[in-house]
Image (cartoon, rainbow, N blue to C red):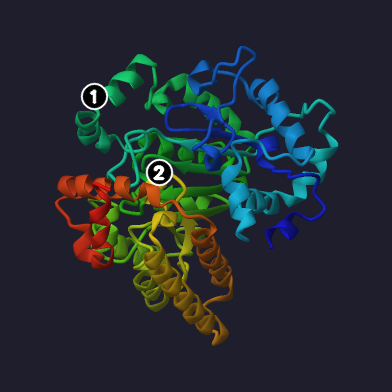
Amino acid sequence: MSGNKDAGLPGIFCALAWLHRFTNAQGQIQVCCSSEEWDNNIRDADGAPMNIVQGRADEEILNSGFMKDVRRQMLAGRWPSFCQRCLVTEKTGGSSRRNQENDHFRAEIPALLAETEEDGTISARVRSADYRLGNICNLACRMCNPSSSAIWIRTWAPNDGGRTAALEAEAGIRYDWYRDPAVMEKLKKQAATLRHLHFAGGEPLIVPEMIDLLRYCVDEGFSSAIELTYNTNITKIPQALKDLWPRFRAVRLFCSVDAFGELNELIRHPSSWKTIDRNLRDLDRNFDAYGLKEVLVMTTVQVYNVLRLRELYDYLFENMTRVSQLPNLVDLHYPAYYSTQILPPDLKKSALRGLSTLLDATNERIKKGLIRPDCAGAVETLKSSIRFLELADHPEEIPKFARQVEGMDAISGRSFYRLVPELARLREFIDG
């Protein structure tokens, strides 16, 4: 079980609460990306959410009363309210973000604990930074929204009477915060102490300011100490990045691919499978030349793809040598109506049967030595998805899912039920 991964650490210690800075697509400063579905905004003394455009120093953010309280809770063994994703992941036997970050920063943890004062005050040195560079994206994925992809604004606003865009404008929410010269200057100053820098979006690989920041790190001699990681839809890889990446300590790509072929195009509209296939093969072929340390395929398990994962497993197994030969599965928690837990009993049994068969086939490939040892750990994510599916039942969400499919099909001009006819009867729940 995952609890053993953090044996010897006090409470539910998570290194991110000590050395991490996370800024979401709207510029809001939050605890981490894994808790975004809950109220995880870091707040000032007046209870107001902090935003990166306010120009606050790292010391003020990490030693705010809010963050000191978070650290005290963790050391006392109490899960903060917004840490539910890690809590559920660990309960189902998976490796949570907390587990992974503690492992990543294990060498620094003794010093972090030794420097922590009784009230939770720490020596604020940012070693890890995660920046969601606005909502500029070239895709409009079905489980997404305008906060993560500006493309959705064109179709989302008419559907909600324009309320989303109007309310965000009224609240002063800015998705272009990373274009503010003062903000970028602060990011550059922070680069001197960074050991890990993560980008997501939107789609980070198409943001010029991100490339400019990498050039700065290279020119100032910081890049050799920094590990770069990205969440990317892997539809576009600028040549400038291929040239810059080898100058960094390591580069890891977490490629969001949710299915094989046409089904991925439907979920991640309007992506082209031909383009994704070409780019994955390019990364596989030029793995060392691009300075890559890891390329993982990250698959969000949801109603859309839970019956069609075998095709993606076979594609990676048959075609990849350096890119991961197994996808890393991540269970969708929100929006709840896309969660696999909404399936009615017979379809849930079918999904579980398919996942169990896939698990057996994958274990057989591992046993025969057909899958690289460094990929084998991903089988645990498959086990976790099985347990997550079994954990709860939420059939009350089916009507909302069926209505979403109807609306999304109309927008994209593609038919989900044509690709996965086994789920076509969920349409009967619309008026249920």
Mark 2: which amino acid? Answer: Pro
Residue 365 in sight here: yes
> Of residues 107 and 62, which is closer to you in this image?
62
> Of residues 250 and 105, which is closer to you in this image?
105
Q: Position of residue 379 (x, y in %)?
A: 54, 70
Tell me which residue sits at (25%, 57%) in the image.
265
Q: Position of residue 137 (x, y in %)?
A: 31, 41
Q: Position of residue 43 (x, y in %)?
A: 59, 21
Asked whether, in this view, residue 212 is left or right of residue 99, the answer is: left
Q: Real-space Cα distance between discs 2 and 1?
A: 20 Å
Tell me which residue sits at (30%, 60%) in the image.
276
Mark 1: which amino acid? Answer: Gly
Tell me which residue sits at (67%, 36%) in the image.
17
Label 1's element? loop
Asked whether, in this view, residue 131 is left or right of residue 134, the answer is: right
- Residue that label 1 marks: 162
| Upstream in sequence: badge 2 or badge 1 | 1
- Residue that label 2 marks: 335
Which image quarter is the N terminus in? bottom right
Asked whether, in this view, residue 394 is left or right of residue 223, the answer is: left
Tell me which residue sits at (56%, 36%) in the image.
220
Q: Is residue 29 above or below residue 149?
A: above
Q: Position of residue 159 (x, y in %)?
A: 21, 32
